[in-house]
Image (cartoon, grey):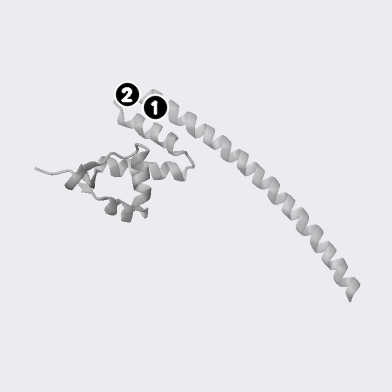
Amino acid sequence: MATNPTYTIGDLAREFDLTTRAIRFYEDMGLLQPKREGPGGRNRVYSARDRTRLKLTLRAKRLGLSLTEAKDIIDMYDSPRDTGPQLRKFLAILAEHRRQLEEQMADLVANLDEVKVHEKEARALLNKVERKGA
């Protein structure tokens, strides 16, 4: 009989290049639910489900979603509900996130344009000063 793979906190930390503290934080947020074994339940044993949830959490973070948004989405896929509402919620979260990113990008472009103007003005002034001094 095949057993399901399990992982220690150290295994997951190495695999995903995280600190054990970060993994415990994700556990505190309810994203991971390891079994406890050993004296006083001190040893965390993570399942393949926990590993997948961690992978999805990190992917959501890379997309810029909050941990709460990540948990909501991941929890939806854990529940045996219809996928229509789940996908609509996911699309709504992504659309809002895209809107925020586009807004930030517009701000960055405006900021960059302003920096370019100041650079041009500073170069012109420097040329003037250097010609005067020569």
- Within the image, what quadrant is residue 70 found in? top left
- Circles 2 and 1, Cβ within 8 Å, touching? The answer is yes
Left or right: 103, with 19 as reference point: right
Closer to the camera, 45 or 65?
45
Name the residue at 60% across, 39% down: 102
Q: Amino acid at mark 2?
A: Arg
Mark drawn on residue 78: none
- What separation in Å lies between label 2 and label 1 (alpha carbons)? 8 Å
Q: Nearer the viewer, residue 88 or 11?
A: 11
Answer left or right for 38 relative to 109. Answer: left
Mark 1 — residue? 86
Circle 2 residue: 81
Q: Residues within 10 Å of mark 2 (few under 14, many from 20)?
A: few
SS label for mark 1: helix
Please state the horizontal and vertical placement of residue 28, each as a whole percent of the image.
35, 40
- Count residues near mark 1 (Cα–Cα under 10 Å), then give few for <14, some for 14-19, many for 20+: some
> In this view of the protein, can residue 104 be seen by the observer?
yes
Q: Quadrant of residue 61?
A: top left
Residue at position x 31%, y 31% in the image = 78
Amino acid carrying label 1: it is: Gln
Instruction: Tell me which numbered mark, 2 or 1, is placed earlier along the sequence.
Output: 2
Q: Quadrant of residue 40?
A: top left
Residue sitting at 39 percent across and 35 percent down?
71
